[in-house]
Image (cartoon, coloured by chain):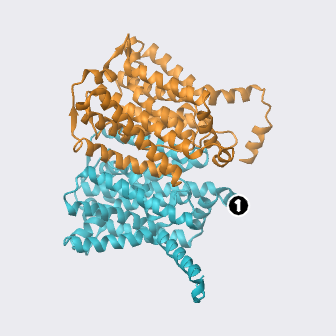
Amino acid sequence: MGQVTTVDDVGSTRGRVARLKVASFIQRQGALVTLVLVCIFAAFRYERFLTEFNISNVLRQNSMLGLVALGMTFVILTGGIDLSVGSFVAVAGVIAALLANQGTVFAITAAIAFTSVLGLVNGLVIAKARIQPFIATLAMMIATRGLALVYTGEQSVRAETATGSFSWLGRGAIGFLPVPVLILIVAYIIAAVVLNRTRFGRHVYAVGDNEEAARLMGLNVNRVTIRVYTLSGALAGLAGVILASRLGTGQPVAGAGWELDAIAAVVVGGTLLTGGQGGVGPTLVGVLLLGVIFNLFNLEGTISPWWQLVLRGLILLVVVIIQNRLSARK
Amino acid sequence: METTATVSTTRRSGNLTSRLGDFGPTYGALFALVLLVVANAIFTPYFATLSNLWNVLQLVSATVLVAVGMTMVIATGGIDLSVGSIMAIASAAAAVSFGRGTAVAILFALLTACAVGAFNGALVSGFRIQPIIVTLATLITGRGAAQVISNGGQLIPFSNPGFEYLGKGYIGPVPVPVVIMLAVVAAGIFIMRATSFGRYVLAIGGNEAAARLAGVKVHRTKIAVYAFSGLLAGLAGLVETARLGASDAQKVGLYIELDAIAAVVVGGTALTGGRATIVGTLIGALIMQVITTSFNMGPFGLNPLPYSWGLVFKAAIILLAVYIQRPKLA
């Protein structure tokens, strides 16, 4: 494709090839290009946008959704979906807050372990009982939310700690980097390596691309499925712990609707819901794009919350339509 | 896995185990409902009273209205997450237009709801975007739009006896919402059993490409199905609004899509499409409502249990129902 002839009379062919290349580039990097454009626009329009305070605030606010979306990316790459992550955020926060007085590390570990086990159950139900991911995780979403509400008596749980180490996770900073942002960066780097450089990562793509073919090649599809849902549970738990640490309380109603925000971020990034195509980089871009747009609404200051909802939905729709048109050309 | 598949195909159709095996998928939901009602009637005080019967039916009516439309959407292999937001749009649209007459307000609200549904269908069918993403975008946008219409999501109280009859009135001993619900269920059964449109819906869900080759107008049918789902959601929104005597664009229909999907799935309609049972959906919704009501009243003479326990129990019912009904050779 690179060696297109330069003779003028095949200019139309060359033009078409160039257009195809541009289309393919936009489809792959469209979200990134949009993110850059939106940031440039914001930097010119709002003085406050490029301040250290604003940037670190945007990153800190979106770090938790970023972690949830990271787990969701693995699940969606296998062709599945995980609706239970919002409830996991709540239950992990409640557990961490309840156990905070018994040592920070213990509280965090216990909370993440608990949601990992719930994620494992999701995976087992989907892989072994062959129940569709949508239904299995919908049931888990309802049940886990119910458990969190039952156990707390529908009240927030205050994290009682003698030391400040529990709140450090959500509010602290190392140098200029807020701790949640640092966790986010480390998580995405590890995830990118796992997805692109390990056997497990290739299996995730293989299962999402064609599950039957993967099975026939001798790949243990069930194990891949169980692992991605466990991972999604663990990352949602981590997000829940960070949220509880930021707020100083574990709230049984936290994280409601996060599953939809996470799915939107994954899709906006360019990962296909059908599985097999996409990656963690695109998801990070999707999370940041939606986060920056939300930040612009706030900086503008005159857009009411309900108009923000309208715009968010429309942006999601426009992005998906554009991606769809571009991929249909191929 | 392969061995179990072989066993079940070679099993003779007449023997007892297979007949028992078939009983679950076909009558399992009905059996569960009867069991729940009988057990509650015997052991839960005041459960088996006429007023409680009408109460249960009245409370379930909005979910059933939405779930009938959802059954058809799911039968085409799609899903409609936007129904709750469409309820809010209809509610707000009616509340702001009572000045032009009750009939005009109702008509305007229903047309708006139908149009939003048709918009969903056009995007799903025309742009070939996944239904879950399209209707997720409509869910977000619609909730915002409803608040825009109602001038910032304020509670709009109204006094309009003619309209409130929709939610609070009685025909003989029967509450009007229950009459509406039964009429819609009957219409749904008629459409799916006795019209070519119903056949087309199932054909598209069974195999879209084959349906297209067989001459089914796939675009038109899909748009009609989503429009119908929108229309019924609008009707549900009006009934709820009339029952409450006020329009609350922030709360009306919130999360009802999950209740509706659960009712459809428990009733025996497969998420993969190609199969639909409206009666099953009614039974599924009733199972969920009987559980909620019984938990509120204090099941089996116990103290009333918090709503949250109901959530856990419902989740278990969903999983159990889907597990029993899963296709044998899947």
Identify whether A267 is placed above or below B32: below
Identify whether A2 is placed above or below B19: below
Q: Which of B121 and B174 is in front in this view?
A: B121
Chain the render paints orange? B
> Which secondary structure lies at badge 1?
loop
Which amino acid type corresponds to the residue marked 1 in the rendered image?
Gly
Q: Identify the residue at image location x=52%, y=69%.
A: A194
User: With B164 as the anchor, is A7 left or right in this view?
Assistant: right
Q: Chain A is drawn in which colour?
A: cyan
Give residue A107's position: percent from left, percent from top.
34, 54
Give residue B308's position: percent from left, percent from top.
37, 35
User: With A57 as the anchor, is B313 left or right in this view?
Assistant: right
Identify whether B180 is placed above or below B216: above
| Quadrant placement of the N terminus of chain A | bottom right
Q: Identify the residue at image location x=36%, y=37%.
A: B87
| Quadrant placement of the C terminus of chain A | bottom right
Give residue B205's position: percent from left, percent from top.
61, 42
Q: Nearer the viewer, residue A106 or A20?
A: A20
Looking at the image, which residue sits at the far top? Answer: B172
Q: What residue is pinned by disc 1?
A: A218
User: With A109 as the anchor, is A201 left or right in this view?
Assistant: right
Q: Can I make out residue B23 in this image?
A: yes
